Image (spheres, rainbow, N blue to C red):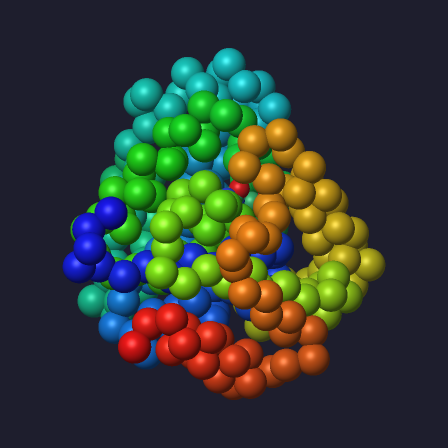
Amino acid sequence: MSMNYRSVAIDGPAGAGKSTLARKLAEKLGFLYVDTGAIYRTVALAVLRAGLDPSDEAGTGGLLGGLDLKMAYGGDGVQRMYLAGEDVSAAIREHQISGVASKVSAIPAVRAFLLDYQRRLAREGSVVMDGRDIGTVVLPDADVKIFLTAAPEARARRRLLELEQRGRSADYETVLQDIRDRDYSDEHRPIAPLKRAEDAALLDTTSLNLEQSLEALLSMVKEKIT
Ligand code: DC
């Protein structure tokens, strides 16, 4: 990693507020925000579109070589994902993609393929990168490592609100169960499971609102990066 660039690694389960907070933090620091979940989601979409079963490791591995995946930033500074030239930034947020992304992200060939991709991004500039294994695997030498979490019930309520704001209806119990299932598979996969790096600071946002969480995050970062 270049000595000139700084990196902040933020890991944690779905719905802890990672992406919103990481994006705002990056804005404050003037770093690039990299949402690695979006990259896994794009691979998941490619798997679905190819008509493959997401638990088909050989089939998914075979798809990677020909995968035309790109990440770019719009004029508004928002990260966008492209699959074969098509902007799939909205499509990858569909509810069904979450479960498929969780499955494909457990495939070793997928993780190996995306590891280089993510590390390259951190070599090209200062980044705030969020995901599940950024502090443990992708950027073990990150300047700042934060493990962001919240109780599953709080995360389910936030996810529900987010879905409602996008005009989707869903019920609390289903969303909560999805979150628990996803936590389980992300934490128990044999490769790069979701876990707090030993040297990561813990931030629990269960009883914090967005501003309070951002404030806490900023002071944790400022301790390490001046
Ligand atoms: O954060 P998200 O919901 O967009 O992530 C989608 C899936 O991708 C999630 O189930 C776990 C996986 N993922 C991962 O395994 N490693 C990352 N660095 C980021 C996401």
Q: Residue 62's quadrant in the figure? A: top left
Is 72 or 214 nearer to us in this picture?
214
Q: Position of residue 84 (x, y in %)?
A: 29, 35
Depicted 61 relative to depicted 83: above or below: above
Q: Residue at x 46, y 60 (%)?
A: 145
Regarding residue 204, the answer to whether it shows in the image is: yes
Regarding residue 162, the answer to whether it shows in the image is: no
Q: Residue at x 41, y 47 (%)?
A: 140
Is 63 or 140 nearer to us in this picture?
140
Q: Position of residue 91 (x, y in %)?
A: 46, 49
In the shown orientation, is residue 154 left or right of residue 56? right
Q: Residue at x 38, y 35 (%)?
A: 114
Depicted 85 relative to depicted 9: above or below: above
Q: Residue furthest right?
A: 173
Report the label total.
0
In the shown orientation, is residue 110 left or right of residue 203? left
Q: Residue 226's quadrant in the figure? A: bottom left
